Image (cartoon, rainbow, N blue to C red):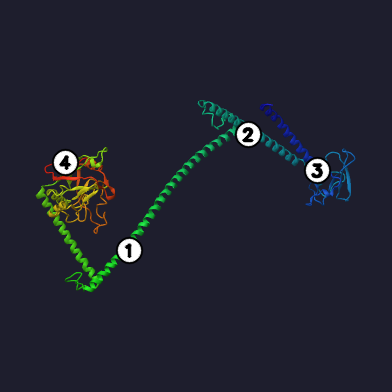
Amino acid sequence: FTSRTKNKQKKRIIPYLTYALATHTTTMLRSRGNRVQKASESSDQQADSSGSGYAGYPAASPMMGVSRGNDDDERRFTWTGYNDGGTKAFPASGGGAARGRRASGAGIREGKVPAPKNGTRGILMSFALILVLFLGGTTFHYSRGIARATQELQALERRNQRARRDAARDPDALDDDVVGSNEMPSDRLGGDAAEQIESLQRTQKSLASETSSLTAKINSINTNIKGMETQLEAMEKDINSYQLESVTLKEKTQRNVDKANEYKTLFQRSFTESGGKKIIPGKGTEEAETLEQLEDLVERREEILWEKIDDLVERIEQDSVRDAIMTFGNPPYYVKMTIEFPMADPEKDPSEWQRTQGTLVFELAPLEKMPHAVNFFLQQIHHKLWDGCAFVINAMHILQAGPHRHIKAGNYEANAVDLMDKFLKAELDKIAFQEYHEDYPHAKYTLGLAGRPGGPDFYINKIDNSVNHGPGGQDHHDLHEEADPCFGKLIRGKRVIEELSQVPVDHAKGGLFLETVTIVNAVIAYDEQFEEEAD
């Protein structure tokens, strides 16, 4: 049969089933009081264990029993009366269901059965019939709706499967309105079922959107967690490093404290043994009776000495300004230095490279910032002390020159006698103090004086050495808070510096040139103006 034929049969069968169910229920209700007594069961045994008799009579009440006669048409009813306690028989003629009811009043007339009240029974039967019809109709209606929705969903699934197979064979023929869509066309569904399906589809879309949003949040949280884990690892490394540094500083501090205590003990012993005259002769030491009093005396004297040093520094700087202006005129000051070096040739051995010359131009620092160092270098140039000297070190950070002479590959005569004597006789071998100005740091291509005290060697900073050569940058000196004087900068000849980087060096010896780089001459460039080259 087709689906349409089955639906028509269901429409016809269900009313008949409903009617049959109602008729059967009515028959059972009518025959409830005429249950056939079993052969092994007496009328009195039909009463239940709770004390109630058959059909709701009490156990002490008169009972009506049913016994089978010779044939099915003859039935006799036995009644236990109230008046004489005897048993009477009644013919089974009509109104059988009424014979099982309890008599009303003081007694029952002999040979008659009280008639039941039919109003309540009719109402119950009507209610039961209506309830059965309602439930049956409702079940039938929703069964049809669910069956239709199921069929439509199956049809839609088959349609999607066909579309997917077609798309697999021909991807260009894919219909976006069909493939992958789980939406049921609402015009093909009936009423409540269509609304429920649409509601479920809306709920599905809402849940999918919320899931997507939660997934994005979870991914973001995971990313943040990974970032925080990375930061924690870095912080742990820093903490470990700081702990090691802290331990090192504590050990160093303890060593310094122990050393200071040792010096204090030696000082106290010497002071006691000499009576104070050996340490600080003269007035004041005799008045110091304890070490603390002596320390106070030393501190006062130290303050006075620093004040005198400051006065001397100021006087030297003033004299340097006056001397520079009187000798070399007003600033700015420029120095031209000609050097000779081997020109790199990759096809030849470095010892066979042709030698060439290049010029370096230095602009000296402002006279008001570095007066002593500027005048010191100008005096060296004026006395031609740098002629014949050499650049000997080409390290990663500096290019250094001095009164040295190249002997052979990698070997130099440091502070060659004839060269160094010129600096000593002119008293221009060392600077008077470590002059430094914070506004003129050791930036790239600036000039600095090497040593403590600085001179006569000078160097060109190939990188920014503001920290390494600034105040406190070289703690191997006794006065580590001092800095190398920075007194000028290279403004021309940067290409020459790049060419010098191709001359081979001995890295094991700190970058000593393996070939000679000689300073031919150095002069003060009067009445000349120079513009700084770009890097």
Q: Which residue is mark 4?
A: 530
Q: Is tag 3's residue or tag 4's residue first in the polypeptide sequence?
A: 3
Q: Amino acid at mark 1?
A: Gln
Cα separation between marks 4 and 1: 55 Å
Q: Residues within 10 Å of mark 1 (few under 14, many from 20)?
A: few
x and y percentages locating residue 508 in the rendered image: 29, 50
Cα separation between marks 3 and 4: 137 Å
Compared across the picture, whether 124 is left or right of 209 comes to: right
Q: Amino acid at mark 4?
A: Phe
Q: Amino acid at mark 3?
A: Gly
x and y percentages locating residue 187 in the rendered image: 57, 29
Is residue 441 something that shows in the picture? no
Cα separation between marks 4 and 2: 99 Å
Q: Which residue is mark 3?
A: 33
| SS at circle 2 | helix
Q: Amino acid at mark 2?
A: Ile
Q: Residues within 10 Å of mark 2 (few under 14, many from 20)?
A: some
Cα separation between marks 3 and 2: 43 Å
